[in-house]
Image (cartoon, rainbow, N blue to C red):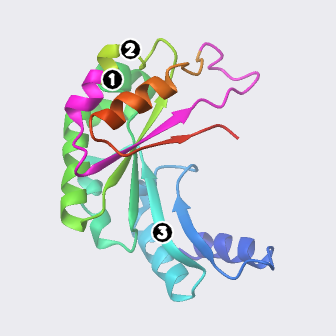
Amino acid sequence: KEEIYDEVKIVLEDNPTLEIFDEVAFQGTGEPLSNLSNVSRAGQLILDQKLAKDLSLATSGNLIMFSKIKDTPVKKVYLSLHATDDKTRNMLIPTNVATGVKKLIACAKKHAEDTKVPVTINYLLLDGINDTIQDLHNLINLLNPDFLIIQLLVLNCVKNSKNQSLKPSPKIEFFKTLLERAGFTVTVLRSK
């Protein structure tokens, strides 16, 4: 927990114009649910020392640990879904083999019901992989707008990446419009 806390403290100290972070996000350098006890302890210390106002966590999912997030100081949860069927999600996120899309969605919905805070579903739109009309219908049918928010992500293309074949979808606005018509709150996170 000390290493996690120290990272936040050092970054805050290196930015003297900042007094406190609005939010600290646990994501991007491994699966936070694989280290949830340290995430929880570090998060509580970050809040106690007034380094941040809120905490969030992004996960690709773990059925056993997902139910334990509610017992941590984490307020917002982002679930990296990226596919509406197991075959596609297994290709994009190999750990899905142990979870499955429907069970994962059920965990997210239960978390939102228990905490009264909607879970944000991250969905990276990839051209020809998860951006078909069927994928859109599956999203609408799988997800419940009363408990889940959708955040559409635009692929950040990186030169010399092993995934050169992946291309950003041109259908972001189309998905956003139709998901909003279906009653979802939708945001778009564009590549910077």
Residue shown at the point (58%, 50%) measured from the top left: 29
Residue shown at the point (52%, 36%) measured from the top left: 153
In this rendered view, identify the residue nearer to me: 28 or 117: 117
Q: Position of residue 39 (x, y in %)?
A: 46, 67
Q: Position of residue 13 (x, y in %)?
A: 77, 79
Q: Is residue 147 above or below residue 127?
A: below
The answer for how far apart the CA atoms under marks 3 and 1 are is 30 Å
Is 87 inside the magenta-drawn segment? no
Which residue corresponds to mark 3?
A: 55
Q: Is residue 144 among the parts visible in the rendering?
A: yes
Disc 3 to disc 2: CB gap under 8 Å: no
Is 143 inside the magenta-drawn segment? yes
In this rendered view, identify the residue nearer to me: 163 or 106: 106
Which residue corresponds to mark 2?
A: 132
Start-end of magenta stretch = 137-165
Q: Which one is closest to the eye, mark 3 or mark 2?
A: 2
Q: Position of residue 40 (x, y in %)?
A: 42, 72
Callout 1 crowding tier (Cα within 10 Å): few <14, some 14–19, many ≥20: some
In this rendered view, identify the residue nearer to me: 123 or 46: 123
Please report whichever mark, 3 or 2, sits nearer to the chain's N-terminal start.
3
